[in-house]
Every structure is written in structure tokens, then in C-alpha cells.
Image (cartoon, rainbow, N blue to C red):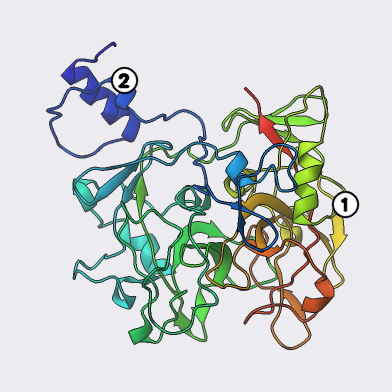
């Protein structure tokens, strides 16, 4: 095994991370220990359980009804290193993170650790966690890389007891707590800010946050009736090109992303379907000489969202123009773009919903009915929510949950395969 000298290893690490910390490397570093810092490596969702349309089930094998779900294609195993200085390095992405949401250092993660969005953008100017001064607010794709779908949605949880709850982040490495109920928050109020500001001109300023308590991405207004919306945040450093796609049109109806080493269908399914049917559709699909197409997991599908686009401002789906997207009519009667199934189950704490909902990504407006019989784009194109895997959409004709989330059940599909 080839070993680098101490001095050369130090220079290499400094060059990779843009390190501004004055520190001597006192440990020999081998090339095997360095994180993979090339391209846009997607971290697996950490979902190892198998589900049917309602609950956890046995392992699914090729030919079974529910074969092709996330646990059949787990992707790259998440891997982290605690640096011992209040930072954590993601060994898959090469990104370095703050390790705790306790930003005021009082030993408790609560409402006092949150800030308004403008203040979060400014805090990077004075932050020096671990002795580094090049921290930044993460992009939506950087923040979503930490999402763990081994977590369970707590939307149905009442009260303040958090024993046994599992968040959507690795708590072996990241210090986390649920919303501060003593400050009149809900347990679910763990909206982590990103740099993604919704480009739609149909809504007031909206920031996309990754909620690691309920396992969703939603757009959140920065103004709450004259007061700042308060966000959690984790700052990141290094790998400033992480999340940048490198598309290649293969001129055969497929698109390769050289950054993620994934090949995508240029067209979508052109029709909507149940989650189970989406699995079957993918596993039996043959195109361009390939028969190993699959339904993408949530993080793979998220990797091709383009948050610079929206139906309202670019008259397109929230995806690069190299792809073709089916136009639909949404709940408000507008021309819009579809939501797409992932292979990932959105596991819930609710006994009735435990494994019955599948994760989708909204490449068009994310509609909701706020109780006025007026459907609006409540969460933004680029949101990630979940739908029942089967059933009748008519049962949700007024929406679902406190914001009247539209429930379609029949969603579209865009297939993927490994390009290498």
C-alpha cells in the first residue's frame, strides 16, 4: 500500500478542503483514508427495511411484488468521521459539517439556537467552529446529503415525549433534538435552512428547508406575520462544487450525469401510476440496450432537481432543459409539471401509516388547500413529500394535514441506472 509522506499529505488535505486552520498534521495519512472528493457522489438513504403497501415486510427478491424498492438498491453506505473538534467529515461527499445544533454552547438544543434567515446568512462571517473560518450555509443538495430514511416521520406524534423517536439524521455523529415545546414549538419544528430560495414569483420570499424530524423538504416563508421565521442550521465547509451536475446527452433518449455516474431516461413515463406499479414498470423496462433500469431512490431523484427553475418563472419543470417533462393540470386548474415517485418509503410513527407512504419529489408546484377551497403552491417546486402508495385520491379531495397537502397517489416516473 502506497503511503504518502506526512508533509505531502498535509499539503494535499489543505488543497482539497481549502483549509484555513493553522495546524500541523502529526499523523501519517494513507490514500485509502482520504474521502472520495471527485464528482457528486450520492450518499445512500440508509433505508435497509423492506415495505409493502402498508407495513414492514420480508426481504423482497427479484420477481416479488415489491422488488425494486430502496432496500434492494441501497447505494453507497453513509460514512462519517468525528474529528474531535466539534466537526464531522462525511467520508462519501468529502464535506465537513458542524456536529451540533447547539450553537450558543449552553449544552441544550432549543429555540435559542435558532436564527432568522438573514441572520443565518450573516453568522458565517464570525463562525470559527473547529478553528476554521470558511464556513458557509449549505446548498439544498449539500444539506439533503445528510438525510437518513432510516428515520420515522413524527407528524402523527402528540405530546412531548421523544423516547423511541428516530430522526432523519445520524445521531451517532450529529447532536440533535426535536422542536422546543417549552417555547411553544411543535416537536416537528426542525426546519434546517439552506441557500435555496424559491425562484417563483407567485409567492413571497420562500426558503427551502430540510426537516430532519419529519423527513421532508418544504419551502418556508421567511416572514411570519411580521416576525422572522426561525430556522435551525448546520454550517458546512469544503467541496464547493458538490451538487453540480455534468450532463451528457447520449443522443439515444438517455442522459448521463458524469458527476453522479448515473444514467437517466430523458423522457418520463408520460403517465401516472401507483408506487407498486412504478416498481414493476422500472424492473421490466428495457431501453437503449439496457435492462437494468430502476426506480431511483429519494436522494438519486433529488440530485437532478434544478432549483434555478420553476413553472412560474421559467415555464418549465424544476429540472435542466436537457430533460423532457410531461405537462399536467394541477389542482388549481393550471398547466403544471408532475411529481415523481422514488423507491424510498417514508416510514411513519403512525401505526396506521407505518410503511404505507412513498417519497416523491415535486418537479412542479407543490400544492395545498389551506381551508379556503383555494389551491396554492404552498411548499414550492423542488419540495419532497410523500403520498399513499395506493388507494383513491378522492378520499383526499380537500387535501391532507394542516396545510391541506394535495394527495395524488398516482405519480410519474423517471428511471435511472448506474452508468458505469
The residue positioned 75% from the left and 55% from the top of the image is 275
Q: How many marks?
A: 2
Q: Earlier in the sequence, mark 1 or mark 2?
A: 2
Quick check: 77 left or right of 35?
Answer: right
Q: Secondary structure at mark 2?
A: helix
Compared with 186, 119 (above or below) is above
Q: Are marks 1 and 2 in contact (CB under 8 Å)?
A: no
Q: State the image coordinates of residue 17 (x, y, percent, origin top left).
A: 32, 34
Residue 188 coordinates in the image, percent (x, y): 47, 74
- Rendered view: 392 above or below 132: below
Placement of 272 over or under 374, stated as above or below: above
Q: CA distance from mark 1 to mark 2?
A: 47 Å
Farthest-out residue, top: 2
The residue that label 1 is drawn on is: 271
Image quadrant holding the C terminus, namely top right
- Between 335 and 125, the residue placed more toward the observer is 335
Quadrant into which the N terminus falls: top left
Would you identify the image quadrant in which residue 327 lies?
A: bottom right
Residue 92 percent location from the top left of the image: 42, 36
Disc 2 designates what residue? Answer: 31
**Left or right, 339 with reference to 187:** right
Residue 50 in the image: state x and y as whole percent.
Answer: 60, 50
Mark 1 closeness class: few <14, some 14–19, many ≥20 residues within 10 Å? few
Within-10-Å neighbours for mark 2: few <14, some 14–19, many 20+: few
Viewer-nearest residue: 348 or 208: 348
> What residue is rendered at 30% in x and 71% in y?
113
Residue at 43% from the left image edge and 40% from the top image edge: 240
Residue beneath the point at 48% across and 51% down: 139
Tell me if 63 is positioned left or right of 184 in this view. right
Amino acid at each position: 500500500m502506497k503511503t504518502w509522506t506526512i508533509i505531502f499529505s498535509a499539503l494535499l488535505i489543505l488543497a482539497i478542503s481549502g483549509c484555513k486552520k493553522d495546524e500541523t498534521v502529526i499523523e501519517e495519512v494513507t490514500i485509502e483514508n482520504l474521502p472520495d472528493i471527485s464528482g457528486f457522489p450520492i450518499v445512500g438513504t440508509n433505508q435497509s427495511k423492506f415495505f409493502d403497501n402498508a407495513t414492514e415486510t420480508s426481504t423482497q427478491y427479484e420477481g416479488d411484488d415489491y422488488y425494486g424498492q430502496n432496500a434492494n438498491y441501497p447505494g453507497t453506505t453513509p460514512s462519517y468521521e468525528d474529528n474531535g473538534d466539534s466537526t464531522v467529515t462525511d467520508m462519501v461527499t468529502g464535506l465537513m459539517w458542524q456536529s451540533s445544533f447547539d450553537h450558543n454552547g449552553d449544552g441544550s438544543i432549543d429555540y435559542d439556537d435558532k436564527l432568522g434567515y438573514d441572520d443565518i446568512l450573516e453568522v458565517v462571517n464570525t463562525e470559527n467552529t473547529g478553528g476554521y473560518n470558511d464556513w458557509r450555509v449549505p446548498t439544498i443538495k449539500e444539506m439533503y446529503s445528510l438525510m437518513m430514511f432510516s428515520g420515522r416521520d413524527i407528524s402523527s406524534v402528540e405530546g412531548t415525549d421523544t423516547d423511541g423517536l428516530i430522526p432523519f439524521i445520524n445521531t451517532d455523529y450529529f447532536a440533535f433534538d426535536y422542536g422546543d415545546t417549552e417555547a411553544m414549538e411543535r416537536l416537528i419544528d426542525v426546519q434546517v435552512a439552506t441557500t435555496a430560495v424559491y425562484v417563483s414569483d407567485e409567492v413571497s420570499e420562500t426558503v427551502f428547508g430540510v426537516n430532519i424530524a419529519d423527513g421532508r423538504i418544504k419551502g418556508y416563508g421567511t416572514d411570519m406575520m411580521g416576525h422572522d421565521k426561525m430556522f435551525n442550521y448546520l454550517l458546512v465547509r469544503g467541496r464547493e462544487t458538490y451538487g453540480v451536475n455534468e450532463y451528457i446527452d447520449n443522443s439515444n433518449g438517455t442522459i448521463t450525469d458524469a458527476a453522479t455516474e448515473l444514467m437517466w431516461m430523458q423522457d418520463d413515463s408520460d403517465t401516472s401510476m401507483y408506487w407498486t406499479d412504478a416498481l414493476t414498470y422500472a424492473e421490466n423496462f428495457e431501453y437503449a440496450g439496457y435492462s437494468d433500469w430502476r426506480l431511483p431512490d429519494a436522494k438519486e431523484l433529488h440530485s437532478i432537481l434544478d432549483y434555478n427553475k420553476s413553472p412560474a418563472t421559467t415555464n418549465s419543470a424544476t429540472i435542466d432543459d436537457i430533460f423532457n417533462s410531461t405537462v399536467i393540470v394541477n389542482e388549481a386548474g393550471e398547466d403544471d409539471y408532475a411529481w415523481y415517485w422514488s423507491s424510498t418509503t417514508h416510514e411513519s410513527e403512525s401505526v396506521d401509516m407505518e410503511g404505507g407512504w412513498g417519497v416523491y419529489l415535486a418537479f412542479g408546484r407543490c400544492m395545498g388547500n389551506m381551508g379556503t377551497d383555494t389551491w396554492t403552491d404552498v411548499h414550492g417546486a423542488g419540495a419532497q413529500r410523500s403520498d399513499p402508495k395506493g388507494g383513491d385520491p378522492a378520499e383526499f379531495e380537500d387535501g391532507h394535514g394542516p396545510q391541506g397537502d394535495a394527495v395524488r397517489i398516482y405519480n410519474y416516473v423517471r428511471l435511472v441506472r448506474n452508468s458505469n
